[in-house]
Image: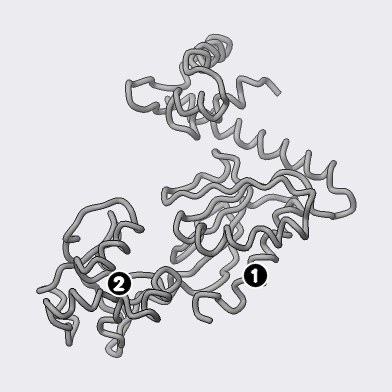
Amino acid sequence: MDPDYSLFAEVVAAGSLSAAGRRLRISSAMVSKRLARLERRLGTQLVHRTTRRLSLTPAGQGFHEDVVGILAAIRAAEARISDNGGSAAGSLRVAAPTSFGRLYVAPYLKNFLDMHPRIDLQIDLSDGFTDLVGERIDLVIRIAPEIGPGLVGHRLATSRRILCAAPAYLAGAGMPSSIDDLAGHCLLAATDQLPWRLEGPGGAIVVDGRSHVRTNSSEVVRELALAGVGIALRSLWDVGHDLAAGRLQRVLPDHEGSAAVGIFVAYPRAAFVPPAVTAFLEYLRGIYAVPPWEG
């Protein structure tokens, strides 16, 4: 396969020439030169270049879909060749949300690697949307109500989310006694996490508002809650230890986030699933059969 095809896919996944250059360990000038060479050979412009970000032309969009399909087929073919009777081997690239990956994936990797020493593992942590095919991710952990089209998803656990705040905040602002009381409190949420969709004795309810501090980081929201800035809706896996230690208290304990939100593992739908993907999926199922954050 033409190496410039792979470079083009990397440019799209990275979002800029400089980011693609860092991933490929070549200069952004070389990335630009090779991309221009590919466009000349194809006789069409693939991307619109701006100072901050790239966007695909209509021709580039169609070509990108074809290229990532070819790359996926090549990886599947390589995996079949190196199958070795079904043993787990070869490269495995896994993506996960930052906090969850740090707390409940990274600490468990040693046992997996001891069990499968022939797997070459790469872990990427990010709170942004992960394009599995475009970024050549083999398997992703997502915390969401559902898995999107084109993916095979397995629900590992429910992501219970509770309202909580630091004792110091509640001592000053008072403990809410009803959902309506939240309107008079400082709410904390990362970008796009409000409104909150809760379930309580009366059924589903939506709590809207504005975060007292604006941030794109869920980890910052947790730290703000611990510091006594306001009330947050946090996953139990994220704040369970803080609740047990008294650093946070539950607020309106008869209300929780929607039970539809789950912790999923997903991988691209394909005729052949590499043994390394299957091995990691089964390993995660074993870990989360009894969620460690609820133990």
Identify the amino acid type marked 1.
Arg
Indicate which disc, 2 or 1, sits on the residue closer to the N terminus: 2
Whole-percent x, y for residue 67 in the image = 61, 30
Residue 140 point in image, percent of width and height: 56, 54
Q: Give whichever of 268, 92 is nearer the camera.
A: 92
**Which secondary structure, mark 1?**
helix
Q: Which residue is mark 2?
A: 197
Q: Is residue 268 above or below residue 188?
A: above
Q: Is residue 83 above or below residue 143?
A: above
Q: Which circle, 2 or 1, is nearer the viewer?
A: 1
Residue visible at 22% across and 72% down in the picture? 207
**Residue plotted at (60% across, 50% down):** 94
Q: Residue at x 30, y 62 (%)?
A: 223
Q: Which residue is mark 1?
A: 285
The answer to which of 114 and 145 lies nearer the viewer is: 114
Label 2 crowding class (10 Å Cα cut-off): few <14, some 14-19, many 20+?
some
Q: Please, which colouring scheme is shown?
A: one colour
Q: Quadrant of residue 78?
A: top right
